Image (cartoon, helix red, strand yellow):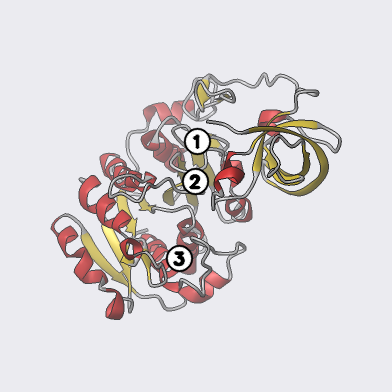
Amino acid sequence: MIQWRQGTVTGLRRRWRGTVELDVALRRRRPEDPASVRALAYPALVGEPEPGDTVLLNVNALALGLGTGGYALVVALPDRLPPDDDRPGHVVKARYTPQQAVVLAADEEASPHRDVLAAADSLDGMPVVTADLHSALPAVVAGVQADRPQARIAYVMTDGGALPAWFSRTLDALSDRLAGVVTVGQAFGGDLEATNVHSGLLAARHALRADVAVVTQGPGNLGTGTPWGYSGVAVGEAVNAVAALSGRPVGSLRISAADPRPRHHGVSHHSLTAYGRVALAAADLVVPAGVDSCLGVHEALTPLRQRHRIVTVAVDGLDAALRALPVKLSTMGRDLDADTVYFLAAAAAGRHAAALL
Protein backbone atom coordinates (compact mmCIF):
# COMPACT_ATOMS: atom_id res chain seq x y z
CA MET A 1 0.00 0.00 0.00
CA ILE A 2 2.94 2.37 0.53
CA GLN A 3 6.14 2.67 -1.46
CA TRP A 4 8.81 3.72 1.04
CA ARG A 5 12.12 5.40 0.31
CA GLN A 6 14.84 7.10 2.32
CA GLY A 7 16.80 10.09 1.18
CA THR A 8 18.89 13.07 2.19
CA VAL A 9 17.72 16.67 1.98
CA THR A 10 19.98 18.52 -0.46
CA GLY A 11 18.15 21.83 -0.60
CA LEU A 12 15.12 23.86 0.41
CA ARG A 13 12.89 25.27 -2.31
CA ARG A 14 9.64 27.19 -1.98
CA ARG A 15 7.68 27.69 1.21
CA TRP A 16 4.03 28.46 1.62
CA ARG A 17 1.76 28.37 4.63
CA GLY A 18 2.35 25.12 6.47
CA THR A 19 4.56 23.54 3.78
CA VAL A 20 8.21 23.33 2.73
CA GLU A 21 9.28 22.03 -0.68
CA LEU A 22 12.56 20.10 -0.68
CA ASP A 23 15.12 18.55 -2.98
CA VAL A 24 15.96 15.06 -1.79
CA ALA A 25 18.72 12.73 -3.01
CA LEU A 26 17.12 9.31 -3.09
CA ARG A 27 18.60 6.08 -1.83
CA ARG A 28 17.54 3.89 -4.71
CA ARG A 29 15.81 0.58 -4.11
CA ARG A 30 15.02 -0.13 -7.76
CA PRO A 31 16.93 0.63 -10.96
CA GLU A 32 14.12 2.86 -12.19
CA ASP A 33 14.20 5.07 -9.10
CA PRO A 34 15.30 8.64 -9.90
CA ALA A 35 18.46 10.02 -8.37
CA SER A 36 16.53 12.86 -6.75
CA VAL A 37 12.94 13.89 -6.11
CA ARG A 38 10.96 16.91 -5.04
CA ALA A 39 9.32 16.34 -1.69
CA LEU A 40 6.90 18.16 0.58
CA ALA A 41 7.22 18.40 4.33
CA TYR A 42 4.58 19.70 6.72
CA PRO A 43 6.60 21.14 9.63
CA ALA A 44 3.66 20.95 12.03
CA LEU A 45 3.75 17.17 11.60
CA VAL A 46 7.43 16.33 11.11
CA GLY A 47 9.45 19.36 12.20
CA GLU A 48 11.57 21.75 10.15
CA PRO A 49 13.77 19.94 7.61
CA GLU A 50 17.31 21.14 6.98
CA PRO A 51 19.89 20.26 4.34
CA GLY A 52 21.69 17.08 5.36
CA ASP A 53 18.69 15.61 7.18
CA THR A 54 17.73 12.03 6.54
CA VAL A 55 14.07 11.81 5.52
CA LEU A 56 11.67 8.89 5.33
CA LEU A 57 9.46 9.29 2.26
CA ASN A 58 6.15 8.03 0.94
CA VAL A 59 6.53 8.02 -2.88
CA ASN A 60 3.08 6.68 -3.83
CA ALA A 61 2.07 9.89 -5.64
CA LEU A 62 5.19 9.73 -7.80
CA ALA A 63 4.73 6.04 -8.54
CA LEU A 64 1.10 6.57 -9.62
CA GLY A 65 1.79 9.77 -11.57
CA LEU A 66 -0.98 11.57 -9.72
CA GLY A 67 -1.97 14.83 -11.37
CA THR A 68 -2.54 16.69 -8.10
CA GLY A 69 1.18 16.94 -7.41
CA GLY A 70 4.29 15.05 -8.39
CA TYR A 71 5.78 15.04 -4.92
CA ALA A 72 7.19 12.58 -2.48
CA LEU A 73 5.87 13.21 1.02
CA VAL A 74 8.06 13.41 4.09
CA VAL A 75 6.80 10.98 6.73
CA ALA A 76 9.49 11.66 9.33
CA LEU A 77 12.91 13.13 10.07
CA PRO A 78 13.99 9.99 11.96
CA ASP A 79 17.33 11.36 13.21
CA ARG A 80 15.93 14.69 14.48
CA LEU A 81 12.45 14.45 15.93
CA PRO A 82 10.51 17.67 16.59
CA PRO A 83 9.63 18.64 20.17
CA ASP A 84 6.32 17.49 21.60
CA ASP A 85 3.38 19.80 20.92
CA ASP A 86 1.54 20.49 24.17
CA ARG A 87 -1.16 22.77 22.77
CA PRO A 88 -4.72 21.96 23.96
CA GLY A 89 -6.96 19.79 21.84
CA HIS A 90 -8.53 16.35 21.93
CA VAL A 91 -9.87 15.87 18.40
CA VAL A 92 -7.89 13.35 16.36
CA LYS A 93 -7.78 13.61 12.56
CA ALA A 94 -6.34 11.17 10.04
CA ARG A 95 -7.40 8.80 12.81
CA TYR A 96 -5.39 5.66 13.46
CA THR A 97 -3.01 6.33 10.61
CA PRO A 98 0.68 6.62 11.54
CA GLN A 99 0.45 10.40 11.29
CA GLN A 100 -2.79 10.96 13.14
CA ALA A 101 -2.87 14.56 14.33
CA VAL A 102 -4.42 15.97 17.49
CA VAL A 103 -6.12 19.32 16.92
CA LEU A 104 -8.28 21.75 18.87
CA ALA A 105 -11.80 21.75 17.42
CA ALA A 106 -13.50 25.13 17.26
CA ASP A 107 -16.27 23.91 19.56
CA GLU A 108 -14.12 22.08 22.14
CA GLU A 109 -14.13 23.26 25.73
CA ALA A 110 -10.64 24.77 25.46
CA SER A 111 -11.58 26.77 22.35
CA PRO A 112 -12.30 30.50 22.65
CA HIS A 113 -15.28 29.86 20.36
CA ARG A 114 -16.81 27.17 22.56
CA ASP A 115 -19.62 29.21 24.09
CA VAL A 116 -20.87 30.77 20.86
CA LEU A 117 -20.72 27.49 18.97
CA ALA A 118 -22.36 25.48 21.74
CA ALA A 119 -25.37 27.76 21.35
CA ALA A 120 -25.27 28.02 17.53
CA ASP A 121 -27.97 26.22 15.56
CA SER A 122 -28.48 28.29 12.43
CA LEU A 123 -26.58 29.93 9.58
CA ASP A 124 -29.12 32.76 9.63
CA GLY A 125 -29.72 32.54 5.89
CA MET A 126 -26.03 32.78 4.97
CA PRO A 127 -25.43 31.92 1.31
CA VAL A 128 -23.12 28.93 0.91
CA VAL A 129 -21.59 28.04 -2.45
CA THR A 130 -20.98 24.32 -2.96
CA ALA A 131 -18.55 23.12 -5.63
CA ASP A 132 -17.10 19.85 -6.83
CA LEU A 133 -13.42 20.73 -7.22
CA HIS A 134 -10.94 22.79 -5.20
CA SER A 135 -10.05 24.66 -8.40
CA ALA A 136 -13.46 26.35 -8.26
CA LEU A 137 -12.66 28.10 -4.97
CA PRO A 138 -10.66 31.10 -6.27
CA ALA A 139 -13.19 31.67 -9.05
CA VAL A 140 -16.06 31.68 -6.56
CA VAL A 141 -14.15 34.16 -4.42
CA ALA A 142 -13.58 36.39 -7.47
CA GLY A 143 -17.29 36.29 -8.26
CA VAL A 144 -18.31 37.31 -4.74
CA GLN A 145 -15.79 40.10 -4.52
CA ALA A 146 -16.53 41.45 -7.99
CA ASP A 147 -19.79 42.85 -6.57
CA ARG A 148 -19.20 42.77 -2.81
CA PRO A 149 -15.49 43.42 -2.29
CA GLN A 150 -15.87 43.77 1.50
CA ALA A 151 -17.78 40.53 2.01
CA ARG A 152 -16.21 38.13 4.51
CA ILE A 153 -15.72 34.76 2.80
CA ALA A 154 -14.92 31.58 4.71
CA TYR A 155 -13.74 28.37 3.10
CA VAL A 156 -15.00 25.07 4.52
CA MET A 157 -12.63 22.36 3.26
CA THR A 158 -13.97 18.81 3.20
CA ASP A 159 -11.88 15.65 3.20
CA GLY A 160 -12.60 14.26 -0.27
CA GLY A 161 -9.25 15.40 -1.66
CA ALA A 162 -6.04 16.39 0.12
CA LEU A 163 -6.39 16.19 3.89
CA PRO A 164 -3.83 18.86 4.92
CA ALA A 165 -4.97 22.37 4.04
CA TRP A 166 -1.25 23.16 3.86
CA PHE A 167 -0.98 21.28 0.55
CA SER A 168 -2.95 24.03 -1.20
CA ARG A 169 -0.90 26.89 -2.63
CA THR A 170 -4.25 28.41 -3.60
CA LEU A 171 -5.15 28.92 0.07
CA ASP A 172 -1.82 30.57 0.72
CA ALA A 173 -2.36 32.98 -2.19
CA LEU A 174 -5.95 33.74 -1.13
CA SER A 175 -5.13 34.35 2.53
CA ASP A 176 -5.81 38.11 2.24
CA ARG A 177 -9.18 37.46 0.59
CA LEU A 178 -10.53 34.88 3.03
CA ALA A 179 -11.87 35.39 6.53
CA GLY A 180 -10.43 31.96 7.31
CA VAL A 181 -10.34 28.26 6.51
CA VAL A 182 -12.27 25.60 8.42
CA THR A 183 -11.05 22.04 7.87
CA VAL A 184 -13.73 19.42 8.49
CA GLY A 185 -13.98 15.67 8.79
CA GLN A 186 -10.54 14.08 8.45
CA ALA A 187 -9.09 17.24 6.83
CA PHE A 188 -6.87 19.37 9.05
CA GLY A 189 -4.60 22.40 9.07
CA GLY A 190 -7.18 25.16 8.71
CA ASP A 191 -7.50 28.27 10.84
CA LEU A 192 -10.27 26.38 12.64
CA GLU A 193 -10.96 22.66 12.93
CA ALA A 194 -14.38 21.03 12.90
CA THR A 195 -15.77 17.53 13.19
CA ASN A 196 -18.09 17.62 10.17
CA VAL A 197 -19.56 19.92 7.54
CA HIS A 198 -22.39 21.02 9.82
CA SER A 199 -20.14 22.15 12.67
CA GLY A 200 -17.71 23.59 10.12
CA LEU A 201 -20.42 25.76 8.60
CA LEU A 202 -21.47 26.99 12.03
CA ALA A 203 -17.84 27.81 12.81
CA ALA A 204 -17.58 29.76 9.55
CA ARG A 205 -20.67 31.78 10.37
CA HIS A 206 -20.30 32.37 14.09
CA ALA A 207 -16.56 32.13 14.79
CA LEU A 208 -15.18 33.60 11.55
CA ARG A 209 -18.22 35.89 11.15
CA ALA A 210 -18.51 35.01 7.48
CA ASP A 211 -21.06 36.62 5.17
CA VAL A 212 -20.56 33.86 2.57
CA ALA A 213 -19.06 30.37 2.84
CA VAL A 214 -17.65 28.13 0.13
CA VAL A 215 -17.62 24.34 0.55
CA THR A 216 -15.33 22.21 -1.62
CA GLN A 217 -12.97 19.32 -1.13
CA GLY A 218 -9.26 19.95 -0.80
CA PRO A 219 -6.94 19.75 -3.82
CA GLY A 220 -7.35 16.58 -5.82
CA ASN A 221 -10.34 14.42 -6.62
CA LEU A 222 -10.87 10.71 -6.13
CA GLY A 223 -12.66 9.04 -9.01
CA THR A 224 -12.99 5.63 -10.60
CA GLY A 225 -14.74 6.69 -13.81
CA THR A 226 -18.02 5.16 -12.65
CA PRO A 227 -21.31 7.01 -12.05
CA TRP A 228 -21.01 6.92 -8.26
CA GLY A 229 -17.31 6.35 -7.61
CA TYR A 230 -16.04 9.87 -7.04
CA SER A 231 -15.49 12.10 -4.05
CA GLY A 232 -17.59 14.94 -5.49
CA VAL A 233 -20.85 13.27 -4.41
CA ALA A 234 -20.20 15.14 -1.16
CA VAL A 235 -21.43 18.30 -2.92
CA GLY A 236 -24.99 17.04 -2.58
CA GLU A 237 -24.43 16.22 1.07
CA ALA A 238 -23.15 19.77 1.62
CA VAL A 239 -26.37 21.16 0.11
CA ASN A 240 -28.35 19.11 2.61
CA ALA A 241 -26.21 20.37 5.49
CA VAL A 242 -26.66 24.01 4.46
CA ALA A 243 -30.41 23.60 4.23
CA ALA A 244 -30.60 21.76 7.58
CA LEU A 245 -28.90 24.75 9.21
CA SER A 246 -31.17 27.35 7.58
CA GLY A 247 -28.57 28.55 5.12
CA ARG A 248 -29.04 29.32 1.43
CA PRO A 249 -27.38 26.69 -0.82
CA VAL A 250 -25.92 27.98 -4.08
CA GLY A 251 -24.72 25.24 -6.42
CA SER A 252 -21.68 25.89 -8.58
CA LEU A 253 -22.00 23.65 -11.62
CA ARG A 254 -19.02 21.90 -13.16
CA ILE A 255 -19.34 22.98 -16.79
CA SER A 256 -16.66 22.59 -19.43
CA ALA A 257 -16.33 23.25 -23.14
CA ALA A 258 -12.80 21.84 -23.21
CA ASP A 259 -12.86 18.54 -21.31
CA PRO A 260 -12.38 15.78 -23.91
CA ARG A 261 -14.25 13.22 -21.78
CA PRO A 262 -17.93 13.02 -22.81
CA ARG A 263 -19.06 12.59 -19.19
CA HIS A 264 -17.53 15.94 -18.28
CA HIS A 265 -18.32 17.92 -21.47
CA GLY A 266 -21.08 20.47 -20.94
CA VAL A 267 -22.50 19.85 -17.46
CA SER A 268 -20.39 17.16 -15.80
CA HIS A 269 -22.14 14.00 -14.66
CA HIS A 270 -20.58 14.80 -11.27
CA SER A 271 -22.84 17.85 -10.95
CA LEU A 272 -25.87 16.07 -12.36
CA THR A 273 -25.51 13.20 -9.89
CA ALA A 274 -24.60 15.25 -6.82
CA TYR A 275 -27.34 17.84 -7.28
CA GLY A 276 -29.84 15.53 -8.96
CA ARG A 277 -29.59 12.40 -6.79
CA VAL A 278 -27.72 13.23 -3.57
CA ALA A 279 -28.99 16.73 -2.72
CA LEU A 280 -32.44 16.30 -1.18
CA ALA A 281 -32.86 20.00 -0.41
CA ALA A 282 -33.39 22.75 -2.95
CA ALA A 283 -30.49 24.89 -4.12
CA ASP A 284 -29.97 27.73 -6.56
CA LEU A 285 -28.01 26.15 -9.43
CA VAL A 286 -26.18 28.88 -11.30
CA VAL A 287 -25.68 28.97 -15.06
CA PRO A 288 -23.43 31.70 -16.50
CA ALA A 289 -25.24 33.68 -19.17
CA GLY A 290 -24.34 32.86 -22.76
CA VAL A 291 -22.89 29.37 -22.34
CA ASP A 292 -25.84 27.34 -23.58
CA SER A 293 -25.56 27.82 -27.34
CA CYS A 294 -23.37 24.77 -27.92
CA LEU A 295 -23.19 22.94 -24.58
CA GLY A 296 -26.81 22.01 -23.94
CA VAL A 297 -26.63 23.14 -20.34
CA HIS A 298 -30.29 23.96 -19.77
CA GLU A 299 -31.40 20.75 -21.46
CA ALA A 300 -29.08 18.73 -19.21
CA LEU A 301 -30.48 20.47 -16.15
CA THR A 302 -34.14 19.81 -17.04
CA PRO A 303 -34.49 16.81 -14.66
CA LEU A 304 -33.14 18.92 -11.79
CA ARG A 305 -35.79 21.62 -12.11
CA GLN A 306 -38.30 19.66 -10.06
CA ARG A 307 -36.22 20.29 -6.95
CA HIS A 308 -33.82 23.14 -7.68
CA ARG A 309 -34.03 26.70 -8.95
CA ILE A 310 -31.99 27.25 -12.14
CA VAL A 311 -30.59 30.78 -12.06
CA THR A 312 -28.91 32.48 -15.02
CA VAL A 313 -26.31 35.04 -13.95
CA ALA A 314 -24.68 37.74 -16.06
CA VAL A 315 -20.92 37.41 -16.49
CA ASP A 316 -20.04 41.03 -17.28
CA GLY A 317 -16.75 41.89 -15.59
CA LEU A 318 -16.12 38.37 -14.28
CA ASP A 319 -13.32 37.61 -16.75
CA ALA A 320 -11.43 40.66 -15.49
CA ALA A 321 -12.09 39.63 -11.88
CA LEU A 322 -10.71 36.16 -12.58
CA ARG A 323 -7.58 37.54 -14.22
CA ALA A 324 -6.98 39.83 -11.24
CA LEU A 325 -6.75 36.92 -8.80
CA PRO A 326 -3.40 36.41 -7.06
CA VAL A 327 -3.41 32.72 -8.00
CA LYS A 328 -3.00 30.98 -11.33
CA LEU A 329 -6.26 29.30 -12.24
CA SER A 330 -6.03 25.68 -13.28
CA THR A 331 -8.43 22.76 -13.50
CA MET A 332 -7.42 19.36 -14.83
CA GLY A 333 -4.33 21.02 -16.26
CA ARG A 334 -6.32 23.70 -18.14
CA ASP A 335 -5.97 27.41 -17.38
CA LEU A 336 -8.51 30.20 -17.70
CA ASP A 337 -8.04 30.62 -21.44
CA ALA A 338 -8.21 26.88 -22.10
CA ASP A 339 -11.45 26.32 -20.13
CA THR A 340 -13.05 29.73 -19.64
CA VAL A 341 -16.55 28.35 -19.14
CA TYR A 342 -15.53 26.27 -16.13
CA PHE A 343 -14.18 29.26 -14.24
CA LEU A 344 -17.01 31.57 -15.33
CA ALA A 345 -19.54 29.09 -13.96
CA ALA A 346 -17.85 29.13 -10.56
CA ALA A 347 -17.49 32.92 -10.59
CA ALA A 348 -21.16 33.31 -11.53
CA ALA A 349 -22.11 31.19 -8.50
CA GLY A 350 -20.05 33.54 -6.34
CA ARG A 351 -21.77 36.55 -7.90
CA HIS A 352 -25.17 35.05 -7.18
CA ALA A 353 -24.21 34.40 -3.56
CA ALA A 354 -23.16 38.05 -3.26
CA ALA A 355 -26.56 39.11 -4.58
CA LEU A 356 -28.23 37.22 -1.74
CA LEU A 357 -26.50 39.29 0.95
Q: Residue 288 location, x and y as percent? A: 34, 71
Residue underneath mark 2:
218
Q: Nearer the viewer, mark 1 or mark 3?
A: 1
Among all residues in the image, which is located at the extreme front? 31
Q: Residues within 10 Å of mark 3 (few under 14, many from 20)?
A: many
Residue 180 vertical position relative to residue 351 in the rendered view, above or below: above
User: Label 1 amino acid?
Assistant: Ala
Q: Is residue 124 visible?
A: no
Among all residues in the image, which is located at the extreme left? 306
Residue underneath mark 3:
143
State which quadrant residue 87 falls in.
top right
Q: Image quadrant for the C terminus?
A: bottom left
Using residue 214 as the reference point, say whether residue 78 is left or right of it: right
In depth, the one of 344 and 233 nearer the eye is 233
Q: Residue 308 location, x and y as percent? A: 20, 57
N-terminal-most mark, 2 or 3: 3
The answer to whether marks 1 and 2 mark residues whose Cβ atoms lie closer than 8 Å is yes
User: Label 3 amino acid?
Assistant: Gly
Q: Residue at x 37, y 28 (%)?
A: 119
Residue underneath mark 1:
187
N-terminal-most mark, 1 or 3: 3
